[in-house]
Image: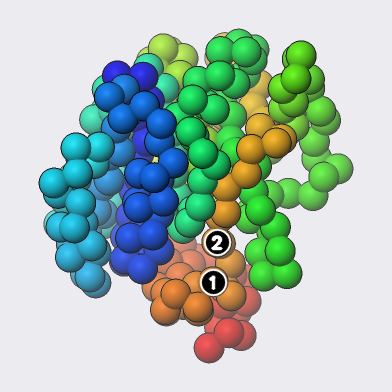
Amino acid sequence: MKVSFVILTWNRYKFLERCIQELVNSIDDELNSEIIVMDNGSTDKTPEVLNRFVNNNLVKIIRRKKNYGLNAYKKLFKQASGEYVVIVDDDVLNFPKSVDKIFIDYMTSFQDYGFLALNVIQNEFTNGAKPEPSFYVDDTKEDKTIEQGPTGGWCSCFRVKDYSKIRLRFLFTNLNMKRGEDGLITKLLYKKLGLKSGIIKKEYCFHACGPYYAKEFGHLDREIEKYKNSGLKNFIDIYKQYK
């Protein structure tokens, strides 16, 4: 197995259905790829959506009765069989063709990087969760360019061999909205192994984050509940403006 795509989901079944289908369609080498979806205690129609993929050989489904928050990633990563793990947010709704080969190609070419994300499509409704351009510096090798800088977990890859060296520290750190899995991994990879993080400049996914798409897909109340549980009042106020 080369690439394990892992998706942690909770009560966003409309996003999830499209996310899984688009990811399945974008994978080139099905024999050396897998998609692992963990239902983190959903109470909506997520189980029904997942049932539509039970016979798909690419997709492995893990169902949990309780919502363990972002700490569920600790169990999810353990299920991965690939040399590379790609974290996929369930609100990523479009992927470049041959997304598995893209990550293998760039992770092979940029050995001094430990965490690489796809770039994000930005429009009038979302910035894709990507910071401003001033945060990035281009790093080019032959025909490939990485924007070195802050790297979100929307669709991001790391090597299992690198993760194994920071695994214990990761497992013993409590994860939450203020200390997410992506930020912790990038911090530990840099601090312990000197590996950088960045964004693959020319390969884009569509990360439908933000209140506009939450409302369009009927998940606005779910987002407000998430931020309420996390104590992030400023986000609650922003999302409530769309009700």
Residue wearing tag 2: 208
Q: Return the residue found at the far right.
A: 134
Mark 2 element type: loop
Quarter of the figure with residue 187 = top right
Q: Position of residue 206 (x, y in %)?
A: 57, 54
Q: Please report the residue visible at 32 percent of the width from the left and 66 percent of the height from the top.
A: 13
Q: CA distance from mark 1 to mark 2?
A: 6 Å
Q: Is residue 236 visible?
A: no
Quarter of the figure with residue 36 = top left
The answer to the question of whether label 1 and label 2 lie on touching residues, with beta carbons closer than 8 A, is: yes
Under mark 1, the amino acid is Tyr
Q: Which mark is residue 213?
A: 1
Query: Is residue 233 toward the left or the right of residue 92 in the image?
Result: right
Where 108 sits versus 66, above or below? Answer: above
Q: Is residue 51 visible?
A: yes
In primary-sequence order, the first of circles 1 and 2 is 2
Q: Position of residue 191 (x, y in %)?
A: 60, 19
Q: Position of residue 86 (x, y in %)?
A: 44, 33
Quarter of the figure with residue 217 = bottom left
Q: Please report the residue visible at 79 percent of the width from the left and 49 percent of the height from the top.
A: 132
